[in-house]
Amino acid sequence: MYRSVFLTWLRIAYADFRDDLIATIDELKQQYLTEEDRTIRNPKKPSLAKAYFIHVVNLYTLFEDAIPTIQDYGIAIKLHSADSFFLAFKKLFRLFLMLELSQVSWR
C-alpha cells in the first residue's frame, strides 16, 4: 500500500518540476556533446557529463513511462475488465522490453 501512495505522490509532484527536468536534459545533452567533440573518446571511462545526462534521462523515463505504466496496470487488475487489463499489460510488457533492451545496449 505504501508503495502505491509514494508513486502517486511522485506522479503528482512531477507536474511541478517536469519543465525544469526537460530543460536540464537539453542542457546536459549540449554539455555532453560539446565534451565528446573536444576530447578523445575513452570507452573504458565514461565522462562525467555523459553520466549526468544518462541519470537525468533515466529519471525522465521513470516519471514519463514507468510510474504511469505501473499504476495503470495496478488499477486495471482491480477493475476486473479484460480490455483495460490487456491494454495495461501491453504497456507493461513494452516497458519491460524497453528496460531490457537498454540494459543490453549498455553492456
Image (cartoon, rainbow, N blue to C red):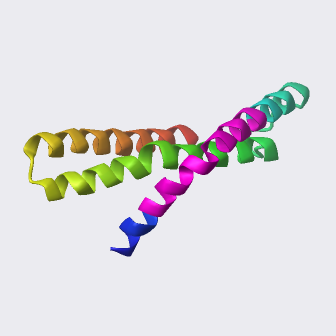
Quarter of the rendering occupied by the C terminus? top right
Instruction: Left or right? Give the position of 99 relative to 71.
Output: right
Q: Position of residue 56 (x, y in %)?
A: 65, 46
Report the number of numbered marks: 0
Answer whether residue 48 is visible to the viewer in this image: yes
Instruction: Left or right? Give the position of 63 relative to 30.
Output: left
Q: Position of residue 58 (x, y in %)?
A: 57, 46
Q: Is residue 16 above or below residue 98?
A: below
Residue situated furthest top in the rendering? 37
Instruction: Tell me what residue is drawn at x 50 percent, y 48 percent.
Output: 63
Instruction: Left or right? Give the position of 59 relative to 84.
Output: right
Helix, strand or loop: magenta stretch:
helix
Q: Identify the magenta region.
A: 8-28
Answer whether residue 107 is visible to the viewer in this image: no
Quarter of the rendering occupied by the N terminus? bottom left
Instruction: Tell me what residue is drawn at x 20 percent, y 51 percent.
Output: 76
Magenta-drawn stretch contains 19? yes
- The one nearer the camera, 94 or 20, is 20
Q: Position of residue 18 (x, y in %)?
A: 60, 44
Residue situated furthest bottom in the rendering? 2
Instruction: Tell me what residue is drawn at x 37 percent, y 66 percent.
Output: 4
Residue situated furthest right in the rendering? 38
Instruction: Left or right? Give the position of 4 relative to 58.
Output: left
Q: Position of residue 44 (x, y in %)?
A: 74, 44
